Image: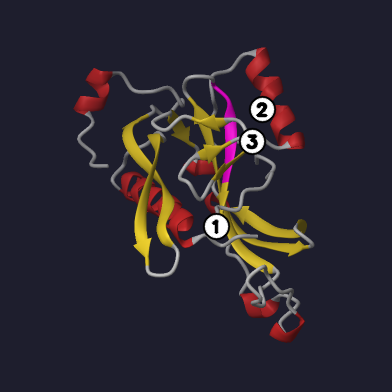
Amino acid sequence: MNAEIENTSLIKVAPSALALPSNPWSEIATELDKVLGAPAVKFTKDGTFALSDTDSVPAGTRCVARIDLVQTGWVKWLDNLVVRRIMGLVAESFVPPARATLDDIEENNWPIDNKGKSRDPWQFQMVLPITRLDTDETLNFTTGSKGGLGAINKLIRTYGSRLARGGGGLPIVELRSDFYKHREYGKIFFPAFLITSWTDNGGKPLSVKDDLEDTIPF
């Protein structure tokens, strides 16, 4: 696995803490997502949100960031496959165990990556479900990189501050990318979630009037 690429995998969606618009089609899709897992999206080293080798989510796409369903924890890899997950919902106050409490502690037994360096088989990750406003499709964005974790953490802090001030709803974000210059690797892209507005407590985007009257800061 390349450390410069966002590592994305299929994560099953946990039951929603905030109901989405209800109809038979949405309800069965939600139930199937719990079993099958939502489609995966990954952030690539060239700064795109990829669905496959040939398909991607356009930059600027607006999504509801399901921050109420964020998961955090550890994933164990073996031969480029996930063999174990220890993850839970932030909303349920899940606290990931310390790395020292997991197996494969001895670095001498770790696999060697393509740069000839030993790599911990356990990787810390977070998963953020995002629901596209243009297609109503929910995707799972999963990351273990500093840039990706920082982008999700920024949303978590903003959401937590909003709740502490008595606000509600979920952030509506635009999918964007940013970059920094690395001495060895050059331009390194990382994902960015630009908050443009919020939903109401029922999961529907606020009207322009309601959004302007919302005095709780982002």
Q: Secondary structure at mark 1?
A: loop
**Label disc, if present, on residue 59 of the rendered structure:** none
The residue under label 3 is 52
Nearer the observer, 49 or 73: 49
Nearer the observer, 75 or 71: 75
Q: Which residue is drawn at the image coordinates 41% and 35% (left, top)?
A: 170
Write down the region rendered in magenta. Answer: 136-141
Nearer the observer, 210 or 129: 129
Q: Position of residue 61 (x, y in %)?
A: 43, 28
Nearer the observer, 114 or 39: 114
Q: Identify the mark nearer the N-term, 2 or 3.
A: 2
Q: Which class describes the residues within 10 Å of circle 2: few (<14), some (14-19), or many (20+)?
A: many
Q: Position of residue 214 (x, y in %)?
A: 23, 31
| Of labels 2 and 3, the one closer to you | 3
The residue under label 2 is 30
As drawn, 193 above or below 59 = below
Q: Identify the mark nearer the N-term, 1 or 2.
A: 2
**Label disc, if present, on residue 93 of the rendered structure:** 1
